[in-house]
Amino acid sequence: MRNMHLTEGDYRKVVVRILGPLREVEERGVMEISVESDMSLLDVLKRLPERLRERVLVNGDIAPDILVLVNNAELSCFESPKNIRVGVEDIREIVLIPVIHGG
C-alpha cells in the first residue's frame, strides 16, 4: 500500500501501521483513519479500533510499552502527544510498535 496523505476539506487520512505482537490484536497491518486537521495525536489514536485502542492507550495516554513513530520519527522527539496536532505537525503516518523486553 502506498503511503497516503489525503486532504478532503478539513479532513485528512492518516496511515497507521501496526507491527509485531500488536498484529494479534488487530490483524490488519495497515489502516487509514480519517481525522480532522486540528486533532491531537492522542485524538487520532482514540479512533483506533476498540481492541487495539485498549492495548495502545492506558488511562488516556500512550501505554508505556508502545513505541510510536510519527512520520518515521520516534515520539520522544516531539512534545507531549496531547500537543502534537495533525494540521500543525502534518502527520502522514503513525507506526505502533510494542516494546518487547525480558528480565
Image (spheres, helix red, strand yellow):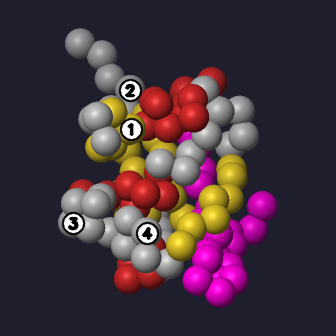
Q: Which residue is mark 1?
A: 57
Determine crowd level at label 4: few under 14, some 14-19, many 20+ residues with C-alpha closer than 10 A. Answer: some
Q: Does residue 100 lie above or below 43 as drawn?
A: above
Q: Does residue 68 lie above or below 88 as drawn?
A: above
| Quarter-of-image position of residue 92 | bottom right
The image quadrant where one finds the C terminus is top left
Q: Nearer the viewer, mark 1 or mark 3?
A: 1
Q: Which residue is mark 2?
A: 100
| SS category of the residue bearing label 4 | loop
74 vs 9, nearest the viewer:
9
Residue 11 part of the magenta-drawn span: yes
Q: Nearer the viewer, mark 4 or mark 3?
A: 4
* Residue type marked 2: Ile
Which stretch is magenta?
A: 1-19
Q: Which residue is mark 4?
A: 39
| Of pointers 1 and 3, the one earlier in the residue sequence | 1
